[in-house]
């Protein structure tokens, strides 16, 4: 974690101060409390920056909506909305509007975190396994909760299979399969972004600028594809969870 990154220093000064006081309140001395405090790393700081940027962007777009003279921000938001809406309509089908906001946020959040690696001096947050894991766990919880909302307790039938007498065998298999989705989403995103970041860094350190520029383009392409795949898989899991054709 480069201490020169101002946002990291700021967050550490804010959060660690609160943690130190909390530890001191239970009897620990200042030195021990500082050692036990969790330090914010660059990946977490950049995640917060991306989240804040997205909230600010959509808040500004919402406040400046215009039918007659849409501004560039509104046009970009409309293009994103049409793209994710078209994909959700194809994958999820009827009622996709309920989930479009979530999958759009997933796509933009993953994409922007991936693209931060193109900025000199910044690491790609998604090359840290904890970042993809957090997004994967959120996606898992979201589609499971929506499956329960759509089917009630009847949602468990999706884990039992169509034939009752093989349900005891299928149930644990389905549970493992669903948990493996978290691992699959995490490892796919983490491994691809880690490899892309590493290749770009190696070529920048060995070869003059013209050749590594090609790998920056590759990093951009990988970032876009991985964000799209993450969004697409989220849609597929949602469609399976809320579908009534089981």
Image (spheres, grey):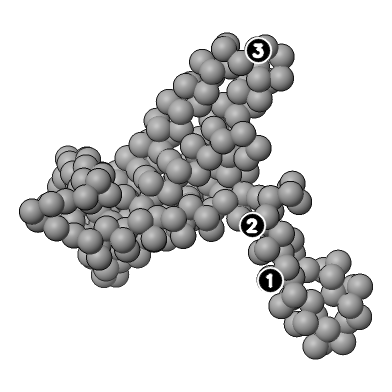
Q: Note whether 106 is above or below 213 in the view shown.
A: below
Task: Tell me where residue 91 sits by quadrant.
Answer: top left
Image check: 26 left or right of 77? Answer: right
Whichever of callouts 3 and 1 sits on the residue coming sooner in the sequence is 1
Residue at position x 39%, y 61% in the image? 55
Q: For the residue carrying disc 2, how many other residues have a C-alpha within 10 Å: few (<14), some (14-19), or many (20+)?
A: some
Whichever of callouts 3 and 2 sits on the residue coming sooner in the sequence is 2
Residue at position x 57%, y 11% in the image? 211
Q: Nearer the viewer, residue 244 or 59?
A: 59
Q: Is residue 86 among the parts visible in the rendering?
A: yes
**Place of residue 122 in the rendered image (x, y in percent of width and height, measured from the top left):** 62, 40
Q: For the residue carrying disc 3, how many other residues have a C-alpha within 10 Å: few (<14), some (14-19), or many (20+)?
A: few
Q: Note whether 116 is above or below 142 in the view shown.
A: above
- The residue singled out by tag 2 in the image is 7
Q: For the residue carrying disc 1, how many other residues have a C-alpha within 10 Å: few (<14), some (14-19), or many (20+)?
A: few
Q: Nearer the viewer, residue 182 or 130?
A: 130
- The residue singled out by tag 3 in the image is 208
Q: Note whether 61 is above or below 113 in the view shown.
A: below
**Place of residue 5 in the rendered image (x, y in percent of width and height, measured from the top left):** 69, 50
Q: CA distance from mark 1 to mark 2?
A: 11 Å
Q: CA distance from mark 3 to mark 2?
A: 31 Å
Q: CA distance from mark 3 to mark 1?
A: 41 Å
- Checking the image for residue 14, the label placed there is 1
């Amino acid at each position: 974690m480069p201490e020169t990154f101002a946002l990291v220093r700021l967050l550490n000064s804010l959060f660690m101060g609160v943690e130190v006081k909390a530890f001191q309140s239970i009897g620990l001395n200042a030195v021990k409390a500082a050692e036990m405090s969790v330090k914010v790393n660059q990946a977490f700081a950049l995640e917060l920056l991306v989240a804040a940027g997205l909230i600010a962007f959509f808040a500004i777009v919402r406040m400046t909506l215009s039918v007659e003279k849409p501004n560039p921000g509104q046009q970009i938001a409309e293009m994103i909305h049409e793209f994710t809406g078209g994909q959700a309509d194809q994958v999820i089908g009827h009622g996709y509007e309920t989930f479009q906001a979530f999958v759009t946020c997933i796509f933009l959040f993953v994409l922007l975190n991936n693209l931060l690696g193109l900025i000199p001096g910044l690491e790609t947050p998604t090359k840290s396994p904890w970042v993809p894991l957090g997004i994967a766990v959120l996606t898992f919880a979201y589609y499971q909760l929506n499956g329960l909302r759509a089917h009630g307790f009847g949602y468990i039938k999706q884990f039992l299979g169509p034939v009752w007498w093989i349900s005891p065998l299928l149930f644990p298999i389905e549970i493992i399969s669903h948990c493996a989705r978290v691992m699959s989403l995490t490892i796919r995103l983490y491994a691809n972004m880690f490899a892309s970041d590493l290749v770009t860094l190696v070529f920048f350190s060995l070869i003059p600028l013209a050749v590594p520029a090609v790998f920056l383009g590759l990093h951009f392409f990988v970032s876009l594809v991985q964000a799209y795949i993450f969004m697409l898989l989220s849609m597929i899991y949602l469609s399976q969870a809320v579908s009534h054709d089981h």
